Image (cartoon, helix red, strand yellow):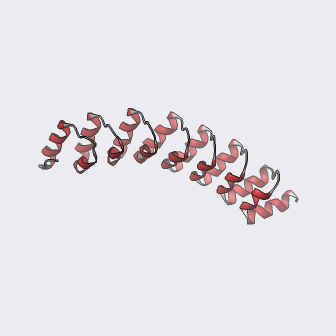
Amino acid sequence: MTVTNAIALVKEFPEAIKYLDNPGDDVITVALLEDPEVIKYIKYPSPGMQLLAVKEAPHCIKHLSDPSEECQMAAIKAAPTTIGYIHDPTDAVKALAVSLDGLAIWYLTNASEDLQRLAVAKTPSVIKYVLYPTLDMQLSVIARRPELIEDINAPHPQVLALHKFLTGIEA
């Protein structure tokens, strides 16, 4: 099959890429532009191919076994919760995800206290995903959103007192 025919084929049917032997970068690029999901059929996608797929559809990062930090950052900038698809995100990628959307903390295992603090500052309702929130985290959440008292795991007595002061209701 000629390159021209292969390009025409994947332009019409992007998934046909999986049946082509050694399709070449031009054919792969056309297929990725038509349907970024076809990245899953490319055995060893180049960093450029990975980036192209992720820029077109951030969730495609789930198909990449070892995406570069640049690729991870591109996915996170477009959709912060795609952090859940990244096997071993760098600290910088984690921080970016949480700074853009506090809910990203839910996808991180063993998130540092700094990341937890950043997530709670960005999105107070994520306090429910922090197993042992610090007193400062608890106080900042209740000062901003007293109704979230129910979402705090084992609220500190000072937090309970602040809640009562702000709402007149014992929690």
- Residue lying at 51% horizontally and 46% vertically, measured from the top left: 84
- Residue lying at 55% horizontally and 43% vertically, measured from the top left: 86
- The correct choice, above or below, for 69 with respect to 78 in the image is above
The N terminus lies in quadrant: bottom right
43, 100: nearer the viewer: 43
In screen coordinates, is 91 left or right of 20? left
**Percent of width and height locating residue 130:** 35, 41
Number of numbered discs visible in the structure rendering: 0
User: Most extreme residue toward the bottom, as rendered?
Assistant: 12
8, 126: nearer the viewer: 126
In screen coordinates, is 96 left or right of 74? left
165, 157: nearer the viewer: 157
- Residue lying at 34% horizontally and 40% vertically, measured from the top left: 131
User: Most extreme residue toward the right, as rendered?
Assistant: 2
In screen coordinates, is 168 left or right of 59? left
Task: Tell me the quarter of the picture where residue 116 sits.
Answer: top left
**Percent of width and height locating residue 114:** 39, 33
**Percent of width and height locating residue 170:** 13, 47
